[in-house]
Image: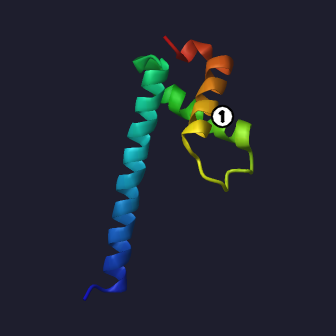
Amino acid sequence: MKSDTERLEEAEFEIEELAMQLADMLGAALHYAGVCDENMPVAVEAYLDALDEIFGDDMEGEMGYEEVIKVIEHLKKTRPKLFC
């Protein structure tokens, strides 16, 4: 039987893996939306900032594909130089 500490460490590891997968998926979404590869780090930061701009404190609901598209469309309007 695993101790609470071992279970906590496993959960933290799984959370880190999921976070890395989400970051990769965001990069893929931005790539297919037309972000230039050299602008990807700036685009990711701009995406995270845009979440606050668009949704503010109303981020308690689910973030589905429609919300992701809304943020990317916002970036296309406000940060067009990120896109090729």
Q: Residue 22: x and y, percent?
A: 43, 45
Q: Residue at x 41, y 38 (%)?
A: 25
Taking the view exactly as shown, the residue that stands out farthest to the left is 1
Q: What amino acid type is highlighted by mark number 1?
A: Ala
Please, is residue 78 above or below residue 8 in the view?
Answer: above
**Residue at the location (48% across, 27% down)?**
30
Q: Position of residue 37 (x, y in %)?
A: 40, 19
**Viewed as shown, does residue 6 lie left or right of 65?**
left
Q: In terms of depth relative to the viewer, which is nearer, 13 or 18?
A: 18
Q: Residue at x 43, y 41 (%)?
A: 23
Q: In the displayed image of the protein, which residue is found farthest to the bottom?
A: 1
Q: Is residue 50 left or right of residue 35?
A: right
Q: Which residue is mark 1?
A: 50
Residue 10 at x, y percent in the picture: 32, 70
Looking at the rendered structure, the number of numbered marks drawn on it comes to 1
Q: Quadrant of the N terminus?
A: bottom left
The residue drawn where x is 37% and y is 84% is 4
Q: How is the image coloured?
A: rainbow
Q: Residues within 10 Å of mark 1 (few under 14, many from 20)?
A: some
Q: Residue 24 falls in which quadrant of the image? A: top left
Q: Is residue 22 left or right of residue 55?
A: left
Element marked by disc 1: helix
